[in-house]
Amino acid sequence: MLQTDEINIRNTGKTGRITLTRPDALNAMTYDMCMGIGAALETWNSDPDIAIVVIDAESSRSFCSGGDIADLYKTGLEGNYDYGRKFWADEYRINEKIKNYPKPYIAIMDGIVMGGGVGISAHGSHRIVTENTMFAMPECGIGLVPDVGGNFLLSRAEGSIGEYLAATAARLTASDCIYAGIADCFVPKDDLPELIKSLETNSDVSIIKEFARECVPGDLALNQKTINTHFSKANAVDIIASLEADKDEWETTAAKLMRRNCPLSVACAVEIVRQSREAQTIEDILKIEYRFTYRSMSHGDLIEGIRAQIIDKDRKPNWQTATLEELTQNQINSMLEPLGADELTFQE
């Protein structure tokens, strides 16, 4: 159906197959890759000969490290914000399509799963992790917020895990992902070829349970009480104050992770997780996320964050507001208020 240097989309028997093929770029997702996935899902949805969809990647190092932000930065630097806004709107519609897909959607989350990679995997009906899985939503580090519907997952994780992951960009192992409800089962990497072959041959998702194994326990469950203690505070300022008042190693590390991220993003990310808990559908949550991303270049810190972390790599971003404590509630509200005629919509 579609084979380029970036992605391979094809039919294998009754299985729709998607393989990301940019290993040298950690399978970072371009706009064309994203649109290719959306078009394939639309075709397979109405094709009675396709029973299931399986998505994976060529690289064992990375399933998908996020969106390819080179064009976002270039266009934003030129004052052209429409490119980014269209990218996000179209991407979010595909995230919604995956979440609500009527056929089984099996995601092989082997390696790095970040940003846009979360949107094309963790909304699937069957989400498989391996010993190589490393999940994170590090968007606050570049002046963005967790998006691609990620707040549907974060807001429904146990206790205050959502706020913790959004504000710190903490990395999760396979076991952590399962505990947080981001993945469903663990399959050793060496067993993936046989599992995928079985799925392609039989198009029967029940086979997955025969490959599922126990995995090494992670730290997330062990730290649940501590996470709840600090990250349930009223807002990001109170969270950081609680962490920094405690001198234990875990709290010190979490506070440092928050401090290195964009203050405006961190404060808004905490608020978005909480608004998302009250939202009923992924569509509602994607609308909330889009309000921030729509404004992230024109009114936020995204361009500076990409410059400091990705382009110049000096790791010295000059945020518009230097600390969480200096932020005003009005700044947070202005990034998250409805967009009126520009509000994200979904095709019928």
Image: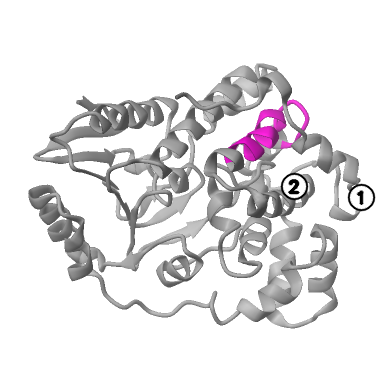
The mark total stands at 2
Residue 189: give x, y in percent of width and height.
25, 64
- What residue type is disc 2 on? Cys
Q: Residues within 10 Å of mark 1 (few under 14, many from 20)?
A: few
Left/right placement of residue 111 relative to residue 84 reads: left
- Name the image quarter holding residue 2: top left
Please state the extent of the stretch shown in magenta in the rendering. Answer: 286-301
**Residue drawn at (54%, 78%), measured in percent from left and top?**
221
- Residue 122's place in the image compared with 240, above or below, is above
Residue 6: give x, y in percent of width and height.
31, 32
Q: Which residue is nearer to you in this view: 225 or 344?
A: 344
> CA separation, marks 2 and 1?
14 Å
Q: Tag on residue 326?
A: 1
Query: Majority secondary structure of the magenta segment?
Result: helix
* Residue 88 seen by the camera: yes
- Name the image quarter holding residue 55: top left
| Residue marked by disc 2 | 268
Residue 176: give x, y in percent of width and height.
47, 70
Say which element carries label 1: helix
**Residue drawn at (69%, 40%), measured in percent from left and top?**
305
- Magenta-colored stretch includes residue 293: yes
- What residue type is disc 1 on? Glu
Which of the two discs, 2 and 1, labels the residue nearer the N terminus? 2
Say which element carries label 2: helix
- Residue 299's place in the image compared with 141, above or below, is above
Left/right placement of residue 259 relative to residue 90 reads: right
- Magenta-colored stretch includes residue 244: no
